[in-house]
Image (cartoon, coloured by chain):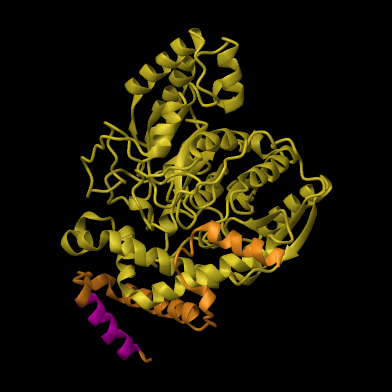
């Protein structure tokens, strides 16, 4: 995606979100948007087995029981 | 520093019980230190001197009558200004909350007060615990006691500065991507982020619901153990609270590291071209000290820090944007620029990005706990790739994290603690993280305490004229 396309997306997102960004900070925020696009590629381009579904991903008990279960298997 | 300010929580506690020192003397001493230094450091937004002295007098009377509320009884502490404090301004450092006075204490604050601790006041924070230091916020930013031209780290900036400067032995912080461990590292204190769910977040202004952790910053590992002991435990009113038993954290502090297997995450500093050259050397020296004490220390490779970073930051940005969306639309001018712009970046995260990041989080947590902590008792990782930066050289990038290497353990949720492991030639602290298995804070504290005994860094304090 070229810079013009990125800027077009950025403008649409900012407008939809109702955000006011001062003109002197816009270039910085466009660069921030590019950083988010890069992170988006990192989190998306991975194998996605069914076991990696996100419910309660952050509850450690749901992690330890899998780890302990694998040890016992 | 006074003799009192050099005493550990355990030593103060013992002195109270031997009647050689009173909580009133200790609180007065802390308040004098705050009065002398706070204009320089801005570590406290609000000092509750009268309340503190009244509580200290009550503690003194309780000791005299034989009432003993435990290891924090009569111990002064500070609370980051995002913790609700009944009857005391809880501003989050923000012009959006210049007059917010809660009726009820945050659960962790209440547990400390129930244990007889003495609240000194509210510590400065980065506004709403995200962004960077700003002069546009309700209170001025805290400064680093080791060099006031440098930042103390954030977001628990005042907590780190207050502990390092000897204003208090312990101050509460919160950690969503490193906000306890980062300021602890930059200020040369101890800072423990316990396991997700270990300490209740109830009454603490949220940044990211699934990444927020509460814990103490303290001068020593033993201070951290005693503080965390009082804060930890199940809270049925915190939806994320874990109903897991709480160990006796002080009991294992003298256990040493002989025979322990410890992994060292060597790849994060190596892959960052901006790593300060003195940091890898300081950590290698610390690892040698652990080996000399009998630990088996081996290098382990984790996923690139950039991968953890992308995962964690996508989650944080999406969640904090949801919290602040209305204010960002309706009154954005009340935020300081660094906080406003970082929060606004949450608008750029798609819903499906967030879900994919959560799925990735599960994968990374499973991998770390099975593959790494399946082989090791604990892991050491660098806390930051850089020492504290200067105020006049703060990054323009709203997403910059100033070299923090802490977010991976918010992603995995494991307990992680910063401990000082040296100083740069400019006199700024260097720190490493000790990381443990879920709910095994006791091991983290044990390894940290062993390293602390093997090193001399706790004897070095900032030179401040007071």
Residue in view at x 35 percent, y 67 percent:
B318
Q: Return the residue nearer the eye: B206 or A66.
A: A66
Say whether residue B149 is visible: no
Q: Is A14 contained in the magenta span?
A: yes
Tell me the orange chain: A
Chain in yellow on the image: B
Residue B237, quarter of picture: top left
Position of the N terminus of chain B by quadrant: top right
Please identify the quarter of the rendering in which residue A35 is found. bottom left
Magenta range is A3-15
Q: What x and y, as percent, mark residue A28? A: 34, 73
Q: Residue furthest front?
A: A73
Instruction: State whether the magenta stretch is mostly helix, strand or loop.
Output: helix
Out of B398 and B451, give the one closest to the viewer. B451
The image shows residue B425, relative to residue B6, as above or below, that is below
Q: Where is residue B241? Give x, y as percent.
A: 45, 48
Toward which corner of the image does residue B320 lie, by quadrant? bottom left
Q: Indicate the position of residue B264 as horizontal and vertical percent values.
A: 71, 60
Tell me which residue sits at (59%, 16%) in the image: B15
Horizontal side of residue B438 vs B72, given as left or right: right
Numbered label tally: 0
Q: Position of residue B368 (x, y in %)?
A: 63, 65
Residue A34 seen by the camera: yes
The answer to whether residue B66 is above or below residue B234 is above
Is B245 included in the stretch rendered in magenta? no
The residue shown at (45%, 39%) is B172
Looking at the image, residue A65 lies above or below residue A51: above
């Amino acid at each position: 995606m070229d810079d013009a396309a990125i800027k077009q997306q950025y403008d649409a997102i900012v407008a939809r979100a109702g955000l006011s960004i001062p003109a002197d900070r816009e270039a910085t925020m466009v660069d921030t948007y590019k950083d988010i696009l890069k992170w988006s590629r990192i989190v998306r381009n991975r194998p996605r087995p069914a076991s990696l579904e996100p419910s309660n991903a952050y509850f450690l008990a749901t992690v330890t029981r899998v780890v302990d279960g694998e040890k016992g298997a | 520093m006074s003799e009192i300010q050099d005493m550990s929580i355990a030593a103060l506690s013992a002195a109270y019980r031997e009647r050689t020192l009173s909580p009133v003397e200790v609180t007065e001493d802390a308040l004098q230190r705050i009065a002398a230094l706070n204009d320089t450091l801005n570590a406290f937004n609000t000092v509750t001197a009268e309340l503190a002295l009244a509580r200290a007098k009550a503690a003194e009377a309780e000791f005299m009558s034989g009432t003993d509320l435990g290891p924090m009884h009569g111990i002064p502490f500070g609370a980051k200004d995002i913790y609700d404090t009944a009857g005391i301004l809880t501003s989050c450092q923000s012009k959006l909350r210049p007059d917010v006075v809660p009726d009820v204490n945050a659960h962790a604050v209440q547990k400390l007060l129930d244990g007889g601790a003495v609240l000194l006041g509210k510590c400065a924070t980065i506004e709403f615990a995200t962004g960077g230091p700003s002069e546009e916020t309700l209170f001025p930013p805290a400064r680093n006691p080791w060099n006031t031209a440098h930042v103390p780290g954030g977001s628990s900036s005042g907590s780190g500065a207050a502990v390092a400067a000897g204003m208090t032995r312990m101050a509460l912080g919160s950690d969503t991507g490193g906000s306890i461990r980062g300021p602890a590292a930059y200020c040369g204190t101890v800072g423990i982020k316990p396991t997700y769910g270990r300490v209740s977040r109830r009454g603490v202004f949220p940044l990211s619901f699934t990444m927020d952790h509460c814990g103490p910053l303290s001068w020593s590992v033993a201070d951290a153990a005693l503080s965390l002991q009082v804060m930890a435990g199940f809270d049925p009113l915190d939806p994320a609270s874990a109903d897991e038993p709480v160990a006796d954290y002080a009991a294992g502090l003298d256990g040493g590291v002989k025979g322990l297997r410890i992994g060292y995450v060597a790849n994060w500093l190596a892959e960052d071209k901006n790593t300060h050259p003195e940091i890898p050397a300081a950590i290698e020296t610390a690892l040698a000290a652990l080996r000399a004490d009998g630990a088996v220390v081996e290098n382990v490779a984790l996923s690139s820090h950039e991968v953890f970073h992308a995962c964690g930051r996508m989650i944080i940005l999406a969640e904090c944007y949801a919290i602040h969306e209305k204010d960002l639309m309706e009154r954005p001018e009340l935020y300081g620029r660094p906080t406003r712009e970082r929060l606004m970046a949450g608008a750029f995260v798609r819903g499906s990005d967030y879900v994919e990041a959560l799925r990735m989080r599960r994968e990374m947590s499973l991998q770390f706990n099975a593959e790494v902590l399946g082989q090791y008792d604990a892991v050491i990782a660098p806390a930051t790739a850089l020492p504290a930066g200067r105020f006049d050289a703060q990054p323009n990038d709203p997403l910059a994290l100033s070299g923090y290497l802490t977010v991976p353990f918010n992603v995995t949720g494991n307990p992680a603690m910063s401990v000082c492991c040296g100083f740069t030639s400019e006199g700024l602290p260097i720190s490493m993280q000790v990381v443990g298995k879920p709910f095994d804070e006791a091991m983290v504290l044990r390894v940290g305490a062993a390293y602390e005994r093997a090193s001399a860094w706790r004897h070095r304090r900032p030179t401040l004229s007071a």
